């Protein structure tokens, strides 16, 4: 079987997994169900969560963990704010029309409940590995929260798919995007980019989560502010086009832009499908990945870190994705024709063209290229940690350092080869990661809702200190279990 056949098979599998009749309704349905069970928590508690995550930045008095709440947030943001925020948004709008952006918003808002729940569970059921580092995520909470063989199968399935996915969507594809863009924009040879990225990754990753946390805490705010300010300048310059852009987004979300062939109503199905799929690709809500970073945070209660982690989806989708989408729609670039091909601009060029229309000189092109470099580079760091924690779950602590070295070396491969098969494989693995996690979220939703209500009844504004929390949580179900989860777990290595 040649590579083209393998790619075709993988794309068929990926198309089914991410199609309108499998993962998309499950993701949206889970987000809606959790939103109802949690009483719209993502809307009612967003303000205090943003204050705790972005202003306070660390949980006062909380010492049990590896990194601060802000570092856990930026590590998760590093993994999610990537090519999906630039190329993914352009893909959704280019195929699904402006209405796709509306469905990306819906996915983000409902996904905040999923992101809260998985991050809550990541902290709630975290453990401590043989080196004294926190380890948590679906690979643990699915087994520890769902007793019996079924929970173990879900946990191990997630771990296997996460390790496979991290080398694709979190490594080679990101490195390839960086290398290709730097070569096209600044004539930097791909092998040079590969060497620089590999050395950078190895230096940071060998230091573990504390090193990753320090780098992402410095890099992520800068890259997001840099990109958003460029987009805001364009939107202000095109302010007259914004009412029409919003009208298109909302009207075409329910009518769709004309689809080629198909049955009546096929346009709206395409808008929903690509809006939801690219939205989830961007913010990863429901996939379980952010719970791994959340589990490393120093926090005084799982609810607090769950709420901080929830803001990641808000920042990624409601802020960064919106900036990209509105610039593409307001400048009219989404319907622009490529003079070389006579067809619609490709998603890889669309965002760059939109920024170039709105900014003087070459600034638009430079901002998108540098934004993509920073976004994709930080994604490599975030996903390396996700892969590492799942390798530790499967093979024990001794496998962690070899994984870090191999992961860094694979970055070079991604920068220097063509990745059609890898993209298709990565999309499939991402979808398969989400499946056991979503099943687990539905099963554990009662525990999440019960313990969330218990905590927020006493501290709705997230201002209590550790002593106050210990006092009002004393005797509550699950509290003592969580407080004693710092005993190291030593696993037989293979």
Image (cartoon, helix red, strand yellow):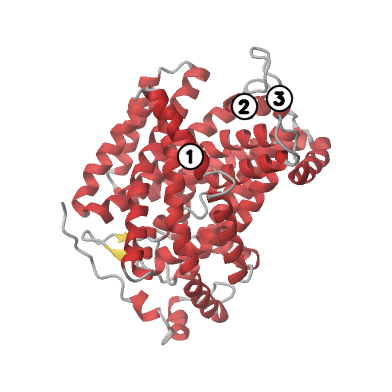
Image position of 42 with respect to 269: above or below: below
Q: Closer to us: mark 1 or mark 2?
A: 1
Disc 3: CA contacts within 10 A as few (<14), some (14-19) or many (>=20): many
Closer to the camera, 160 or 191?
160
Q: Is residue 419 left or right of residue 261?
A: left
Tell me if I can see residue 378 in this picture: no
The percent position of residue 486, horizontal first and vertical second, equals 29, 70
As measured in the structure, the alpha-carbon distance from the residue carrying label 1 to the one carrying label 2 is 27 Å
The image quarter containing residue 320 is top right
Residue at image mark 1:
14
Q: Is residue 374 left or right of residue 200?
A: right
> Image point 21% across, 42% down: which residue?
402
Q: In the rendered image, which quarter contains the N terminus?
A: top left
As measured in the structure, the alpha-carbon distance from the residue carrying label 1 to the one carrying label 3 is 34 Å
In primary-sequence order, the first of circles 2 and 3 is: 2
The percent position of residue 55, horizontal first and vertical second, equals 55, 59
Tell me if I can see residue 114 in this picture: yes
Q: Closer to us: mark 1 or mark 3?
A: 1
Closer to the camera, 380 or 90?
90
Q: Are marks 1 and 2 in contact (CB under 8 Å)?
A: no
In primary-sequence order, the first of circles 1 and 2 is: 1
> Image point 21% across, 48% down: which residue?
399
The image quarter containing residue 359 is top right
Residue at image mark 3:
357
Extreme residue in the front direction: 263
Tell me the element at label 3.
helix
Disc number for residue 352: 2
Disc 1: CA contacts within 10 A as few (<14), some (14-19) or many (>=20): many
């Amino acid at each position: 079987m040649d590579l083209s056949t393998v790619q075709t098979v993988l794309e068929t599998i990926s198309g089914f997994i991410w199609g309108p009749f499998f993962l998309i309704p499950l993701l949206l349905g889970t987000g809606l169900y959790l939103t109802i069970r949690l009483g719209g928590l993502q809307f009612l508690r967003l303000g205090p969560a943003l204050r705790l995550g972005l202003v306070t930045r660390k949980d006062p008095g909380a010492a049990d963990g590896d990194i601060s709440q802000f570092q856990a947030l930026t590590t998760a943001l590093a993994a999610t704010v990537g090519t999906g925020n630039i190329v993914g948004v352009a893909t959704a709008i280019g195929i699904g029309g402006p209405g796709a952006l509306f469905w990306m918003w819906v996915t983000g808002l409902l996904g905040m409940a999923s992101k809260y729940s998985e991050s809550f569970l990541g902290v709630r059921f975290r453990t401590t590995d043989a080196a004294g580092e926190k380890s948590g995520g679906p690979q643990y909470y699915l087994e520890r929260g769902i007793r019996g063989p079924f929970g173990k199968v879900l946990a191990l399935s997630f771990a296997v798919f996460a390790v496979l996915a991290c080398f694709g969507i979190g490594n080679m594809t990101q490195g390839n995007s960086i290398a290709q863009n730097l070569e096209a924009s600044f004539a930097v040879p791909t092998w040079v980019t590969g060497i620089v990225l590999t050395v950078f990754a190895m230096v940071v990753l060998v230091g573990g989560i504390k090193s990753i946390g320090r780098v992402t805490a410095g890099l992520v705010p800068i890259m997001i502010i840099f990109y958003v300010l460029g987009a805001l300048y364009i939107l202000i310059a095109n302010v007259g086009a914004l009412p029409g852009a919003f009208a298109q987004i909302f009207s075409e979300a329910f009518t769709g832009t004309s689809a080629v062939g198909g049955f009546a109503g096929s346009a709206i199905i395409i808008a929903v499908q690509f809006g939801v799929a690219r939205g989830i690709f961007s913010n990863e809500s429901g996939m379980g990945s952010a719970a791994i970073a959340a589990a490393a945070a120093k926090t005084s209660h799982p609810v607090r870190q769950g709420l901080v982690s929830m803001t990641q989806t808000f920042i990624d989708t409601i802020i960064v994705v919106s900036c990209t989408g509105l610039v593409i729609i307001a400048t009219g670039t989404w319907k622009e024709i490529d003079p070389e091909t006579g067809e619609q601009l490709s998603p890889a060029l669309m965002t760059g063209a939109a920024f170039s229309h709105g900014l003087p000189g070459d600034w638009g092109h430079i901002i998108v290229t540098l934004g993509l470099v920073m976004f994709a580079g930080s994604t490599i760091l975030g996903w390396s940690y996700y892969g590492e924690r799942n390798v530790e779950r499967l093979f024990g602590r001794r496998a962690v350092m070899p994984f870090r070295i191999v992961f860094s070396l694979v970055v070079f491969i991604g920068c220097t080869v063509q990745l059609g098969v890898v993209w298709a494989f990565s999309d499939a693995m991402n979808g398969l990661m989400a499946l056991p996690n979503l099943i687990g979220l539905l099963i554990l939703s009662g525990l999440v809702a019960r313990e969330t209500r218990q905590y927020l009844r006493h501290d709705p504004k997230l201002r209590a200190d550790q002593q106050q929390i210990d006092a009002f949580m004393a005797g509550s179900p699950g509290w003592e279990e969580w407080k004693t989860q710092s005993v190291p777990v030593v696993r037989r290595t293979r």
